[in-house]
Amino acid sequence: MSHAYKAPPLALMGLEPMRAMLEYVSAGFMDRSRLPTGDGHPVVLFPGLGADALAMEPLRRCCSDLGYEACDWGRGCNTGPRGDMEGWLDLLTEGVAATVAQRGRRVSLIGWSLGGIYAREIARRRPELVRQVITLGTPFAGRCEHTNVGVLLQMLSGRMPALDAALLARLALTPPVPTTSIYSRSDGVVAWQACCEAPGPNAENVEVQASHVGLVWHPQVWAVVADRLAQPEDGWQPYAQAKQPS
């Protein structure tokens, strides 16, 4: 499959730190009292490439304050797949299965960037464990050339992951659970087009105005996440403000 789009301009990527800082400050002024609270089900958060629990803490704390049992993925810094891709995904799936067994309830998975790939694949492997998947700037429908993170991935993991055509095609398929992809057209790290789901009854795309780095603490993202997590179990409905990208 050919793609007409490319990775975001490097100039836009260069603005990421400043934009993310401003978004972090704006999150501190957000009135979260108007966000819907939840039913206490567990939520597992997967960080983006090069990120860890510290980077995800603002979003985890927001989810916790809304009444959910929110936790980090528990594997430190995300340096990319460790070893064989399929084996790595199996290992992450086992971790989610353990959380479900411990809490006695299905989990919602939230993944930022590469972490969203993990969340989607876990839901594909064991859909009975997963209530829904929410991804933030996750380029599941693209390739390495549609992002500006290839060099960072090689630095962190020492190699580029082997992604054959069959695996790339599978990554683009919507998991068999309700799935929300949050994306930004001004993302400076990944091409927003690579973050868009095909239309479907349990799949949606929600656009926000945010930097890639700032997605995990952006007030608009928090509002969407709160709304999605508050959906009743087995009663998921599309986000009211969602629209298909054009």
Image (cartoon, rainbow, N blue to C red):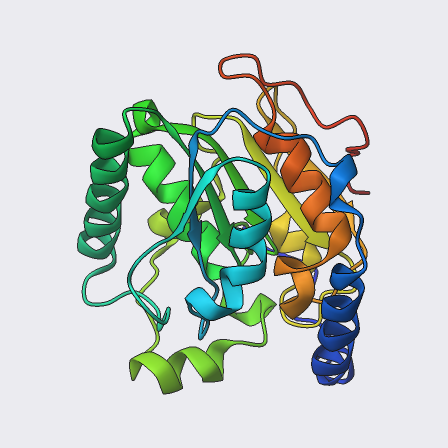
Kindly indicate the quadrant of the structure image that contains residue 105. Answer: top left
Counting every numbered tag in the picture gives: 0
Residue shown at the point (63%, 66%) measured from the top left: 190
Residue 6 in sight:
no
Kindly indicate the quadrant of the structure image that contains residue 239. Answer: top right
Q: Nearer the viewer, residue 175 or 132?
A: 132
Q: Is residue 218 left or right of residue 158?
A: right
Give the percent coordinates (x, y) of residue 108.
45, 35
Q: Quadrant of the C terminus?
A: top right
Q: Nearer the viewer, residue 65 or 93?
A: 65
Give the percent coordinates (x, y) of residue 196.
64, 45
User: Height in image: 143 above or below 108?
Assistant: below
User: Height in image: 89 above or below 235?
Assistant: below
Furthest toward the top, the residue is: 235
Residue 148 in sight:
yes
Kindly indicate the quadrant of the structure image that contains residue 162. Answer: bottom left
Q: Is residue 236 left or right of residue 25?
A: left
Q: Nearer the viewer, residue 133 or 232?
A: 232
Q: Nearer the viewer, residue 90 or 97?
A: 97
Residue shown at the point (79%, 73%) measured from the top left: 22
Give the percent coordinates (x, y) of residue 126.
28, 30
Residue shown at the point (81%, 60%) measured from the top left: 29
Give the percent coordinates (x, y) of residue 82.
23, 67
